[in-house]
Each structure stands twice: as structure tokens, then as C-alpha cells.
Image (tube, rainbow, N blue to C red):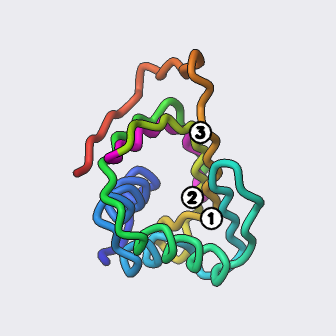
Amino acid sequence: MTKLSSSELAEDAFYAAFASCSVQDMGAVWAEADVVCIHPGAPALVGHAAVMNSWARILTAGDSVDIEYERVTRMATDDIAVHVVREILIQNDGRVEVTATNIYRCLEGTWKMIEHHGSQAMAKTRATPSSTAVKRTLQ
């Protein structure tokens, strides 16, 4: 994977890996240490091995998923970026909306994910995107 020169590129790579079910590409997005992942309705997974094992199970489950995501807001410093994202996951059996917080850190000149926290959105609740919202559809 190429060097991820911004948190936005790291986020695009994360969702591209998710959409293509690539365990290798997903691993390249995550930092090697000090990472946390919370899938909707699940406990916190701490550490690179636990996080990558969970993504390997998800990505190799064989279910095709179309993903749309929209950056609702972004806050950043020189080496940390926090993105709140609205995800729409579309599978054969329906559509699920997830609100996620993705945190990235610039490590040795490349942006890596250090935390992903997804929560299934309530049916009648929808975050309002900021004026800088970016929407992507991946298939």
C-alpha cells in the first residue's frame, strides 16, 4: 500500500479495504500498536492482533457488502485526526446505518488508523453532515 499522506486518504483506504474484503489492505491501514476497535454491539478489542483477527473474520465471512460513507465532521491536529462518519452498509438482507468515530495518527509520515468505534444508528436519528462532508460509495 502506498504512503497515506492525510487522514482522509487513510479513511478512503480503510473503506476501500472493507468494501473489497481485503484483509491485507485492512492491515496496512491500521497502526501496529496502541489500537482499539469497537464493532457495533460488541466489546472493545484492544491491540493489533485482536483488531486484525476481528477484521479477518468479518472480511472473509463471504457476505458481499456495498458501503457508502459520509464524513460528518473532522477535527485534527498535526498528528491526530478524529472523523465522525455515517456509514450505510447494504447487504442482501437489507441496509444498516452505522455512526462511526475513526481516529487516525500520523506515524513516521504516514497516517494510520488507531481507533474505529461503530454504533448502529437509531432508526429515526441521523447525523447532519457538516459543510465539509464527503460522501463515497464503494462496491
Give the Cα distance between marks 1 and 2.
5 Å
| Side (left or right) of 66 relative to 120 | left
- Part of the protein shown in magenta: 78-92
Q: Outermost residue, left direction?
A: 139
Secondary-structure class at tag 2: strand
Where is mark 2, residue-wise? 104
**Between 11 and 7, the one nearer to me in the picture:** 11
Q: Is-magenta flag for residue 91?
A: yes
The reply to whether callout 1 and callout 2 are in contact (CB within 8 Å) is yes
Give the Cα distance between marks 3 and 2.
11 Å
Q: Amino acid at mark 2?
A: Tyr
Where is mark 3, residue-wise? 75
The answer to whether 116 is drawn above or below residue 114 in the figure is above
Residue at the image point whose x is 64% and y is 42% from the top: 119
Q: Is-magenta flag for residue 13?
A: no
Secondary-structure class at tag 1: strand
Residue 44 place in picture, x, y as percent: 76, 62
Where is mark 1, residue-wise? 114
Residue 92 place in picture, x, y as percent: 32, 46
